[in-house]
Image (cartoon, grey):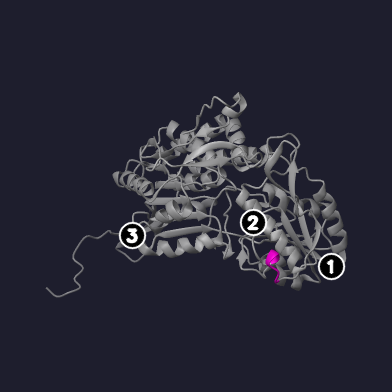
Amino acid sequence: MIDVQNKGDMNKEEQDRIFELKMYVNGEWCEASTLEKRTIVNPATGKVIAYAPEGTVADAREAIDAAKSAFESGIWSELSAQERAAYLFKIADKIEEYGEELTRLETMDNGKTLREAGFDVSDAAACFRYYAGLITKPDGYTYHVADPMQAMVVREPVGVCGLIVPWNYPLLMSVWKIAPALAAGNSIVFKPSEVTPVTPTKLFQILDEVGLPKGVANLVMGVGPVVGNEIAESAYVDMVSFTGGTKTGKHIMRVAAGNMKKISLELGGKSPNIIFADADFETAVDYALFGIYAGAGQVCSAGSRILVEESIYDKFVERFVERAKQINVGPGNEEGSEMGPLVSQEHLEKVLGYIEIGKAEGARLACGGNRIIKKGYEKGYFVEPTVFVDVTPDMRIVQEEIFGPVVVIQKFKDEAEAIKLANYTDYGLAGGVFTVDGAKAMRVIRKLRAGITWVNSYHPTYNEAPWGGYKQSGIGRSLGTFGLEEFQEIKQININLQVEPIGWFSK
């Protein structure tokens, strides 16, 4: 629950931005069992905006038990698709009703600009509506098999689903998992990032307001190694869906093996954005900027490796650097801000550390590379849009996910080398190709080992289309019909239309 915590020594504006968060278990708002709290800060100011419960293993187990009881009771899982859809439509309406508040909270929670946060809120409402509509559509099959049998397939909910989301899209990533999981009839145990729990808490207030049955949706806060690990390891959790780093994803795979639970993992990326010499030049530059600096580069599908054909390489670097230097970096809620801060002090240090690694490896810093200290926001986690050139494929800044406003620009001679460089990474989440040659675009796209690709564009996402990657970028897909199927089991049903003894054995 989001309640204003009054502090006598603070002015009114500051009071209004400090919230006392609670967990939501079995339909009730509650504290952590230890009553311990975590401090949540605004990335633009470094000021406290909330205090969140520090959940424990015991808290996670209580939430899992509540979800298990709710699922087994059938209070949600046995509702008709139309009844579940009605709830989801109401949730979408509430998201829009609270749209302005959610937008402000998302900017305070994560640091992203109001423009970006506003798009996320709109997409969140649309996602609930998409799955509300999808769940009522035909989803089974019948088969013409040998008489006297009739065979069919139906889809059923998995059971108790553990949902664990990252901090870069606190609201939208929550919705990408919660909407299809609930649409399918599952009960959920949800863990937001311990860094950004504010907007997910507001979302759960909405779930409570629409009257979702008790125990169907449970919110537990806490750190990954404690609460997240318990969710992934529990024998009473039938599926775990995780979005975050590849290292954590591998750990979840290991601990989830205990009861062979279903897993869905959307992990890291080091995605290539390939610019051919025949591309519309300004369009390619513009999308390349958007591909890396949207969300301050804290996007799993960010185009963090720009590959440019050698005949236009110098021209492209010059123009890209010129444009990057013009990006207005500032607090997300400040008019004119085009790129906000990084999410936390810890992540700031990580990104700055990678910039130092790039220098030490011999890459040339074409622009950026520094922390920005803004007047009035001296404690904010701002970093300049950063560009490295003269890099080699084996450099750490080329191979490892930095997850910040840092891009490397590589040179290639021809189509074959572009493909080789693009695929020369352990990741396979996304990729883009810019060219006016449609046949060439399709040849390259078909050879990219990536799950999400664009031609003459970068970043657009649609609720109707699947989201996920190849290789170490994950397992499974979010969104679209594929995203619903992740939260369903497939059951074969065979019906004998001629009820009489089979006569297999002698009497």
Element carrying mark 2: helix
Residue 83 is situated, as x and y percent measured from the top left of the image, at 40, 38
Q: In the rendering, which numbered label is found on residue 350?
A: 2
Q: In the rendering, which numbered label is found on residue 264?
A: none
What residue is drawn where x is 65% and y is 51%? 348
Residue 69 is situated, as x and y percent measured from the top left of the image, at 30, 45
**Amino acid on which disc 1 is placed:** Glu
Give 130 or 161, whichever is nearer the viewer: 161
The residue that mark 3 highlights is 150
Of labels 2 and 3, the one closer to you: 2
**Amino acid on which disc 3 is placed:** Gln
Horizontal side of residue 152 vs 438, given as left or right = left
User: Marks 3 and 1, Cα distance to the nearest angstrom?
Assistant: 62 Å
- Is residue 140 shown to the viewer in this render? no
Q: Is residue 235 above or below residue 101?
A: below
Give 312 or 22, whichever is nearer the viewer: 22
Of labels 1 and 2, the one closer to you: 2
Horizontal side of residue 421 vs 200, given as left or right = right
Element carrying mark 3: strand
Q: Is residue 232 magenta?
A: no
Residue 117 is situated, as x and y percent measured from the top left of the image, at 63, 39
Give the residue at the far left of this rendering. 507
What residue is drawn where x is 39% and y is 53%? 158
Q: Earlier in the sequence, mark 3 or mark 1?
A: 3
Give the residue at the far bottom of this rendering. 506
What are the residue bounds of the magenta stretch? 394-398
Give 307 or 149, whichever is nearer the viewer: 307
User: Marks 1 and 2, Cα distance to the nearest angstrom?
Assistant: 31 Å
Q: Earlier in the sequence, mark 1 or mark 2?
A: 1
**Amino acid on which disc 2 is placed:** Lys
The residue that mark 1 highlights is 310
What residue is drawn where x is 38% and y is 55%? 238
